[in-house]
């Protein structure tokens, strides 16, 4: 038999809130809240791409190509290039004809334990919703 979970305390609740909270946006790469250029350093580039995908595409929720491109355009200077980068990085998958995109990975920018479809911070609206 397993031990019962420890009782809730303010310290435990604060720790859980910290662990389950999304990571802050990579602000040093944003200009007035938009991504103008991808960072050159691979680790920074991957961080920014994970942030972008978490802002726009819910996990396991297909998004049409046009809706995704329009949502990306609100957040990045080169929406088509970033969409391609997201696919190449394995953060987005797509149908063979490119009509729909979806995400299967949870990132540090997702709100864990929240209802599906809630994003990291008050970023741009998600496509289709």
Image: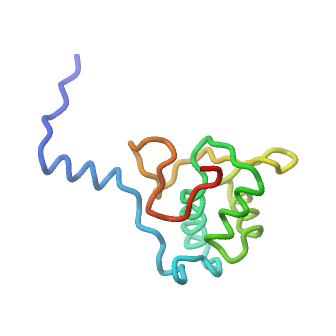
Q: Please report the residue visible at 52 percent of the width from the left and 77 percent of the height from the top.
A: 33
**Residue 54 lies in quadrant:** bottom right
Tally of marks:
0
Q: Nearer the viewer, residue 16 or 1?
A: 16
Residue in the picture at 68% in, 70% down: 73
Query: Looking at the image, which residue is at 60% across and 65% down?
Result: 49
2 up-or-down from 116: above or below? above
Hey, which residue is sitting farthest top in the picture? 1
Residue 29 x/y as whole percent: 53, 79
51 in relation to 20, above or below: below
Q: Is residue 82 left or right of residue 15?
A: right
Is residue 44 placed above or below 66 in the rendered structure?
below
Question: Does residue 49 appear to the left or right of 122 in the view shown?
Answer: right
Instruction: Tell me the residue at 48%/54% (across/down).
Output: 119
Q: Position of residue 14 (x, y in %)?
A: 20, 53
Q: Quadrant of the N terminus?
A: top left
Q: Position of residue 83 (x, y in %)?
A: 73, 62
The colour scheme used here is rainbow
**Relative to residue 16, is residue 82 drawn left or right?**
right
The picture quadrant where one finds residue 65 is bottom right
């Amino acid at each position: 038999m397993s031990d019962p979970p420890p009782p809730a305390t303010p310290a435990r609740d604060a720790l859980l809130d910290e662990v389950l909270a999304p990571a802050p946006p990579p602000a040093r790469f944003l200009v007035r809240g938009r991504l103008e250029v991808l960072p050159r350093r691979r680790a920074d580039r991957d961080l920014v791409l994970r942030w972008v995908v978490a802002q726009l595409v819910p996990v396991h929720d297909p998004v049409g190509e046009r809706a995704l491109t329009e949502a990306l355009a609100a957040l990045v200077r080169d929406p088509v290039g970033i969409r391609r980068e997201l696919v190449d990085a394995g953060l987005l998958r797509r149908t063979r004809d490119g009509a729909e995109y979806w995400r299967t990975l949870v990132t540090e920018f997702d709100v864990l334990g929240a209802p599906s479809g809630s994003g990291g911070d008050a970023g741009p609206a998600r496509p289709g919703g």
